[in-house]
């Protein structure tokens, strides 16, 4: 999990990562999002909605075994991150780690 956190931070620094349910939903609907990361403590209804959108659009999603506070910390953000959408991984290998 720590290695995935480091790769997520690298994606934030070198690529294009969106934060928040609305931004992730829009990116999934437009077909730009390559991976959606969901925190373990995300609101149930919001989590189900995003997962359903991902399944419909064919976008992979991953429920991270960390809280929104932990994901925010990994990303270097001073706020809770319940949903993160990776549009461009940059120099990160996060897409490869999640698919294992």
Image (tube, helix red, strand yellow):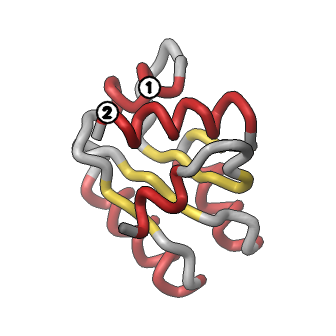
Residue receiving disc 1:
74
Density class for disc 1 (Cα within 10 Å; few <14, some 14-19, many ≥20) is: some
- Residue 4 rendering spot, x and y as whole percentages: 40, 42
Q: Which quadrant is home to the N terminus?
A: top left
The residue located at (67%, 63%) in the rendering is 33
Residue bearing the label numbered 2? 2
Where's residue 81, x and y in %?
Answer: 45, 33
Disc 2 crowd rating (10 Å Cα; few below 14, some 14-19, many 20+) is: few
Instruction: Note whether 93 is above or below 53 in the view shown.
Output: above
Residue located 73% across and 74% down the image: 31
| Side of 46 where 30 appears, left or right | right
Left or right position of 17 against 36: right
Is 5 rendered above or below residue 72? below
Q: Secondary structure at mark 1?
A: helix
Count the numbered circles shown. Answer: 2
Disc 1 and disc 2: Cα gap in Å? 9 Å
SS under mark 2: helix
In the rendered structure, find residue 59 and report the number of the disc placed on it.
none
Residue 45 at what x, y percent from top left?
Answer: 31, 60
Q: Residue at x 42, y 20 (%)?
A: 73
């Amino acid at each position: 999990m720590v290695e995935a956190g480091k790769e997520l931070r690298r994606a934030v620094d070198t690529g294009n990562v969106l934060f928040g349910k609305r931004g992730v939903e829009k990116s999934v609907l437009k077909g730009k999002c390559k991976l959606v990361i969901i925190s373990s403590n995300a609101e149930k209804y919001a989590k189900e909605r995003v997962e359903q959108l991902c399944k419909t659009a064919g976008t992979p999603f991953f429920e991270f075994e960390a809280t929104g506070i932990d994901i925010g910390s990994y990303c270097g953000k001073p706020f809770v991150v319940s949903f993160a959408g990776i549009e461009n991984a940059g120099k990160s290998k996060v897409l490869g780690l999640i698919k294992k």
